[in-house]
Image (tube, grey):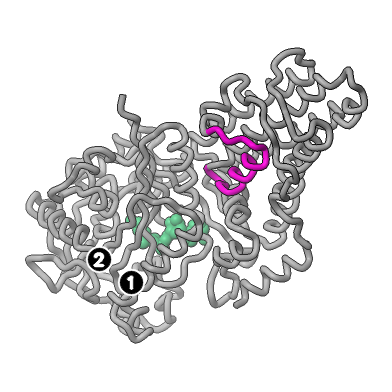
Amino acid sequence: MEPKTFYVTTPIYYPSGKFHIGTAYTTVLADTIRKYKKMRGYDTYFLTGLDEHGQKIQEVAQKNGITPQEHVDNMADQAKKLWKLMDISYDDFIRTTEERHTKVVEQIFDKLMEQGDIYKGEYEGWYCVPCETYFTDTQLVEGKCPDCGREVKKMKEEAYFFNMKKYADRLIEFYEENPNFIEPESRKNELFNNFLKPGLEDLCITRTTFDWGVKVKKDPKHVIYVWLDALTNYITALGYGSEDDTKFKKYWPADLQIVGKDIIRFHGIYWPIFLMALDLPLPKKIYAHGFIMMKDGKMSKSKGNVVYPEMLIERYGLDATKYFLMREFSYGQDAVFSPEGFVERFNFDLCNDLGNLLNRTIGMINKYQAGIVKPSMENKSEIDKNLEEFTEKQIQKVEENMDSIHLSNALTEIWNLIARTNKYIDETAPWILAKNEEDSETLNSVLYHLVENLRKIAIMLNPFMQDTSKSIMEQLGIEKEELKKWDSIKEGSTIEEIHVIEKGEPLFMRLDQTEEVEYIKNEMKK
Ligand code: ME8
């Protein structure tokens, strides 16, 4: 039987400035889910990329004295370098300036025009001449331009519109029939109550105020406005509308489209409607996560509170950085990044809980049994049985949380297992068992249970922290690939005699709280 497919996407990011931990968060989230699904036997496909058109990009390039194309080429290199550093294993990286994309956007526009979904009208809004940008009533700040604070003028221009109203009822019906289409539910309710119920406005999909974008073929003074151009990346990357659409046939509809809460309206309303107009199936799930905030609000260069992933990775390692992002920010909610929180998680969770469990285990196996542990399934004590039952339940909870995108909860459950396993050492007191020859079987059984739990923990951590997972396996002396697979954590006894490493290596070195908090704070100001 062919394995089931799993197609996951991130938003395509604007390459307007250096990518910060917000962008990295979405990408790591998608990548972790992909890695998990792969371990569960799915044929996975993971798409990310850049949204390279639009006025803002044109302006940034101008400011830097280069062409927009040169600018986006540089930024695409930067993004790919960052994802490589973060061990993000995407299958494709789409750039909206690529011909494979622009050609299909032109075709889509023509098709929608021909079938009457797009019409020509007039766009009216508040125009800021120096910024060359339109704003709506609600976007203005005290009646002035929200970007530069200058006077705005009411202006009109010829533009193309998409007839959203035509599809609104069908979308409402779709929401009702597919209650899990948008998650978390609170976001779906927001979209429903604030946009769908009051009635959708038609969407202006072209501009004449800039020219860095896909032009309307039959009316080239109009540039297709970023959202129709951007959203379609999820299908053009798979070859939709091209000669070779094998991937499209195989992977569409997407199983999971991850976005930040800031763009859920575009993904939960306009995107499904565009797909309906193209007569294509809708994605199975759109998940909107919350935002990483700073103590003083949003991350911004002018506030000097931006955190870049490179800084954390260089100083604390990739796994610690990813662990923090995936643990600290829970399902659909905003959370605050703090240097204190980062260092605490590093010291408590990684050094104390996980690092010590491995270190103590390796140390005891070397000290009491010359580095050797034998399989032990008989003569289980009540304490052993209790640990096994607990472990089984935790595995189930981790799977449920992973499957429902509650990655932070999955990590919490893994850490509950780590804590329980640490407690098992205290309950069984191997240092006492080691004193009596007649307890040698019991001692081996205790050490065997520790190895087994560490092996299971390493497997469940694998989608999050691959190097750490690998290092745990190496230190335990577990080499067989079969013993590193997800399914093996649910089977009974699996290990044969193992020889652990002679001297355990610390997984993480304890940090000086004050020094490191200071370090991160200083880096944020740079
Ligand atoms: O909106 N916390 O691109 P964008 C968490 N090009 N996530 C954050 C974040 C933060 N502080 N800041 C940004 C665009 N993000 C469009 C998308 S898709 C067809 C087009 C993440 O560069 C989050 O995923 O502004 C958010 O939705 C995305 O970056 C916005 O990226």
Dot 2 corresponds to which residue?
97
Callout 1 secondary element: helix
Question: According to the image, label 1 marks what residue?
Answer: 72
Which image quadrant for residue 253? Answer: top left
Instruction: Name the spot of residue 83 as percent of width and height, x first.
Output: 45, 59
Separation of marks 2 and 1 at Cα, in angstroms: 9 Å
Q: Is 110 left or right of 394, judged from the image as shown?
A: left
The structure residue drawn at horizontal position 70% and vertical position 70%, both measured from the top left corner, is 519
Q: Is residue 254 left or right of residue 262?
A: left
Mark 2 Cβ and ligand 1 under 8 Å apart: no
Quadrant of the rendering where the N terminus is positioned: top left
Q: Give percent across and percent down for residue 70.
A: 31, 77
Label 1 near label 2: C-beta < 8 Å?
Answer: yes
Q: Nearer the viewer, residue 85 or 272?
A: 85
Q: Quadrant of the C terminus?
A: bottom right
Magenta range:
463-480
Type of amino acid at the residue the image marks with label 1 = Val
Of the numbered discs 2 and 1, the one sitting upstream in the chain is: 1
- Left/right placement of residue 424 relative to residue 395 reads right
State the count of labels.
Answer: 2
Q: What amino acid does circle 2 point to?
A: Thr
Where residue 255 sits in the image (x, y, percent)? Answer: 36, 39
Q: Is residue 398 something one can see in this rendering?
A: yes
Residue at the location (73% across, 56% down)? Answer: 509
Q: What residue sits 62% from the left and 45% below the top? A: 471
Is residue 473 in the magenta section?
yes
Question: As drawn, which residue projects farthest toward the top?
Answer: 379
Above or below 295: residue 384: above
